Image (cartoon, rainbow, N blue to C red):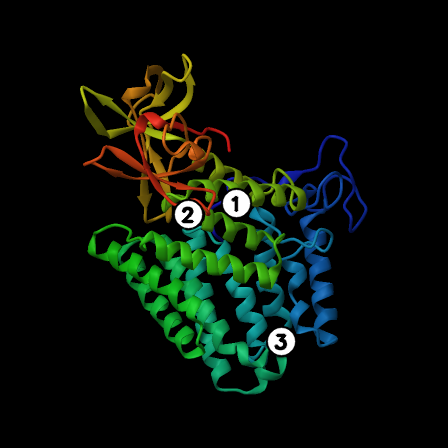
Amino acid sequence: PLHTSTMTTAQAPLDEPSCWLCLEEGQDTFGKPLVRNCSCRGSSGFAHISCIINFAESESKRAYMSGDMGDSLATFEVCPNCKQDYQNDVAYELSKAQVEFVEREFTGAQHGFLYTNALTCRLVLLNVKNESDRCEGEEVISKMLSTFEAMKHTEQHRSHLLHPDATKAFEGHANANIGTFYHKIGSDDGLRKAKFYFQKARSIFESEGDELGVMTINNLIDNVEAEISGDGRRCLTQAIEVGLELRKYQLFTKEFGADDNTTIEAGVQLALAMWKEFRTIEAERLLVKLIATSRRVHGMGHDCTQFSISALQRVKERRVFLKKDDEINVDKVYRVIRYTSDGERCVVQGPVSKVVYDPRSNRSEPSHDGAERTFEVGRANVVTSRGTPVVCTGLQKATHLNGKIGDRREFDEDTGRYTIHFEDETLKPVMVKPENIRVVFEL
């Protein structure tokens, strides 16, 4: 998963509908309520977990008997109504049931692909902050490794694969997921294990000629090594990261389609990489497009939509520094809200909380250094940060650039001017005085 969700499963409203499987209203025989956590909307899609499990088991047996290996376990992972992945606690419960089902119905190395697929799905949903889940994760990993070893000593499993040549590639991705599990734990031992399994995954990707997989794993290995050495998280140069994320987004769009939640989340990661490279206008326009797609396909409350909206809120912050007596205070960052007094003054908020990377959660979290306040300052005392969308105004010589928007990039100390990279790619970047640009709040 590209992010940790804080969303909860939707429960049936007061005028609750019936379970689409058993057609009963209210709780099941185990006292569990109707739930829904996919992309279904309105009154559709609600069901009892027990009913979903029974349906998934029945459909999996049917698909297996008919030789449709590609769909053998799909009903444990994808809602048959909206055709989208289950998420959060519904996905968590179904992944557990999926493993139990395969262990009960499909034994032996000839079913290794089914088993390792179920184990992998379970592993990525475990919460390493929960001691019980960490222990289960160790058991899952042990089962995955022993199953792969058994599969290497038999050729029978090949007849059961959707793509016979995909065995090594699947093992590579499984090792990558094992490495991610240990990376999230973040302990010294966890980091060493993460590096080991990432390296195993890289070797497999290299042997398979998976250039994108190698690039992704190399970045993960570099981050782990930086954390082991105590240097914190290492980041790719922004241009390389944008290139990597763009290739992933293009690949997912081709493989899964633009509406798939995996593709949308890859697009969000691309937008964030662009933003870090100070290509804010591109990032913001991409996020607006992704949010519209996610709302249409998955609904407003879906994790994918909320993740996209959260990213847009982050990208739309127009951050600035304040200047006093010609000295810029770079230690405190503020967000500019709007202009007043015909553009001569600015309303700002801050100082903005710093963002600190936490290797244990593998997420960036804000650190609160104090309460923010809102106040006005003169426009001349506001210094825009790199990547801020601006519009040119009041230019006397290059009048054709007035009204053109672009990202504020480098600052040249000798001339006291900013380099502006315009959204209109037919226009070359130009250097503009600070008094000839205004922050663009809405594109």
Q: Which residue is mark 1?
A: 286
- The residues bearing labels 3 and 1 have C-alpha atoms spaced at a distance of 35 Å
- The residues bearing labels 3 and 2 have C-alpha atoms spaced at a distance of 37 Å
Q: Secondary structure at mark 2?
A: helix
x 69%, y 52%: residue: 50
Q: Which residue is mark 3?
A: 162
- The residues bearing labels 2 and 1 have C-alpha atoms spaced at a distance of 10 Å
x 44%, y 76%: residue: 209
Q: Secondary structure at mark 3?
A: loop
- Asked whether the residues under the numbered discs 3 and 1 touch, taking CB atoms below 8 Å apart as contact, a structural biologist would say no
Q: Position of residue 106 (x, y in %)?
A: 62, 74
The amino acid at mark 2 is Met
The amino acid at mark 3 is Leu
The amino acid at mark 1 is Leu
Q: Position of residue 376 (x, y in %)?
A: 35, 14
Is residue 227 shown above or below 308? below
Q: Secondary structure at mark 1?
A: helix
Q: Quadrant of residue 163?
A: bottom right
Is residue 158 shown above or below 77? below
Q: Position of residue 234 (x, y in %)?
A: 28, 53
Q: In front of the other: label 3 or label 1?
A: 1
Residue ranking furthest to the top: 341
x 61%, y 49%: residue: 90
Q: Is residue 72 left or right of residue 165?
A: right
The local crowd at label 2, few if under 14, some if 14 to 19, many if 20 or more residues have their Cα within 10 Å, is: many
Q: Which residue is mark 2?
A: 274
